Image (cartoon, grey):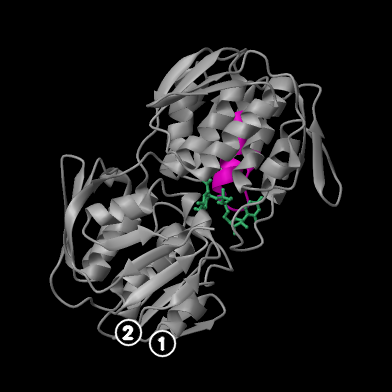
Amino acid sequence: MDSIQIEGGICLYGQTKIQGSKNATLPILAATVLIDGTSRIENCPDIADVSAMINLLRSIGCIVTKEKEAIVIDAAKVVKSNLPQEEVTKMRSSIMLMGALIGRTKSITLDYPGGCIIGKRPVDIHLMALRRLGVQIEETENTIHAWTTGLRGSSIFLPFSSVGATENCILAGVCAEGVTHILNAAREPEIDALCEFLIRAGACIEGAGTTHITIIGVDGLQSVTYRVPNDRIVAGTYALAGVICGGEITLLETPTEHMQKIMEVIRHLGATIWEENNRLIIRRLQTIRALPYLKTEIYPGFPTDLQSMLMVACTIANGRSIIEETIFENRYKIVKDLCAMGADIEVENTKAYIGGKTRLQGKHVIAEELRGGAALVLAGMAAKGTTVVENKYFIDRGYENICADLSQLGSRICVK
Ligand code: UD1
């Protein structure tokens, strides 16, 4: 199994282009099932989770062709609604096929979805919302069987603004009879992207980007071409690499409009960050300042997906920082590795107290999940000596080519 080897302690100077967004691509690929025709999705990242979604689409009868710049999905012959266990359990986004397949074939059977081990990640809100739309659901220990005699619009209040549950409701609602209101909907930009795609295909959706989304059911959707936006989490990862290592880097084709909170936090850390025509430039010449307190929040707050990378920055900051994780309860898995590299971090319930002023030492560490794995790579870049991050495959779930990108920024990093 591949590892990543990093020679740390090098300032970054260089530029790299940001890939397409994973979290936008996955629900959009699931949404193509609703279209009795061909969808052409451009700018999809070439990552493991996208390959898993393609395998799921093929398993139900879609003809999927990968071109250089696009994935083309012909969903005219969706024949099956049983999803293969091996692919479903690889990633949580397989749950997106529930709303889409019920919309198309009126039934679905799948195993409980997998994904990174960063918390309990139940699907109760998804199932509650689908029930409200007229879906019958039977759960066994490992599987979910759902069917409907006809989806009906309804008002659904989400007890938590779950990104996935909002997306599933939208997918089930677009071809339901009548009007669906999603209240306390998530506002993540990836939901806007899904709605934009569906609207182009003929769906009638209002309020994307707000906490109240209204969907007026339509009879069917038509063939469409759509370009997914670039990945704000990958851009945030590399921006934080620039903060952690120092120097000056430029991120090309960055979705800066969705990164305002990330930019604000980077400024608090003492770096200079500015945007110029979709490019994000990060310059850090002085010591990093500590963060007295920061919590992860739903959008537009600071994203949980960048919490681990921020923690690495705090280990070398000039003072004590406190980070609180409010979205996923098990997202401090890298703390033991960072402590092995010399960091001073204590975790109490949802809060992490980070000592700061640490000169991290290169170590052999093991990635246990996607974003934590990327954060360990950043820790290796800050550390003295050589770091090896094992289990590169976790990082490949979300980063097209982290080694090439970070090399372009000046890091001494390679696949081992
Ligand atoms: C999505 C993103 C993920 C990001 C997360 C939060 C994708 C493919 N993944 O994941 O990168 O970290 O949003 O921004 O877009 N919850 C329940 N019951 C449910 C659903 C969720 O209790 O039915 C809880 C989860 O356990 C978690 C919290 O709600 O604690 C947030 O989950 P959610 O917003 O659904 O995240 P995902 O859609 O899985």
Left/right placement of residue 194 relative to residue 169 reads left
Frontmost residue, 11 versus 324: 11
Label at residue 140: none
N-terminal of the two: label 1 or label 2? 1
164 part of magenta stretch: yes
Query: Callout 2, which amino acid?
Result: Gly
Task: Give the CA distance from mark 1 to mark 2.
Answer: 7 Å
Task: Verify CB contact (< 8 Å) between mark 1 and mark 2.
Answer: yes
Determine the secondary structure under disc 1: loop
The magenta segment:
156-172
User: Which residue lies at the image location 19% right of the left edge and 50% below the top edge?
Assistant: 15
Image x and y of residue 52, in percent: 59, 39
Image x and y of residue 61, in percent: 68, 21
Determine the secondary structure under disc 2: loop
Query: Callout 1, which amino acid?
Result: Asp
Quadrant housing residue 339: bottom left
Q: Is mark 2 within 8 Å of ligand 1?
A: no
Vertical placement of residue 163 versus 272, above or below: above
Q: Which residue is mark 1?
A: 344
User: Which residue lies at the image location 50% right of the left edge and 13% below the top edge?
Assistant: 223
Q: Is residue 207 visible?
A: no
Image x and y of residue 170, in percent: 58, 32
Label 2 CA crowd tier, 10 Å (few <14, some 14–19, many 20+): many
User: Which residue lies at the image location 59% right of the left edge and 53% below the top edge?
Assistant: 160
Q: Which residue is mark 2?
A: 356
Label 1 CA crowd tier, 10 Å (few <14, some 14–19, many 20+): some
Image x and y of residue 373, in percent: 47, 63
Frontmost residue, 21 versus 264: 21
257 part of magenta stretch: no
Left/right placement of residue 172 relative to residue 221 reads right
User: Which residue lies at the image location 37% right of the left edge and 76% below the top edge?
Assistant: 293
Left/right placement of residue 307 relative to residue 123 reads left
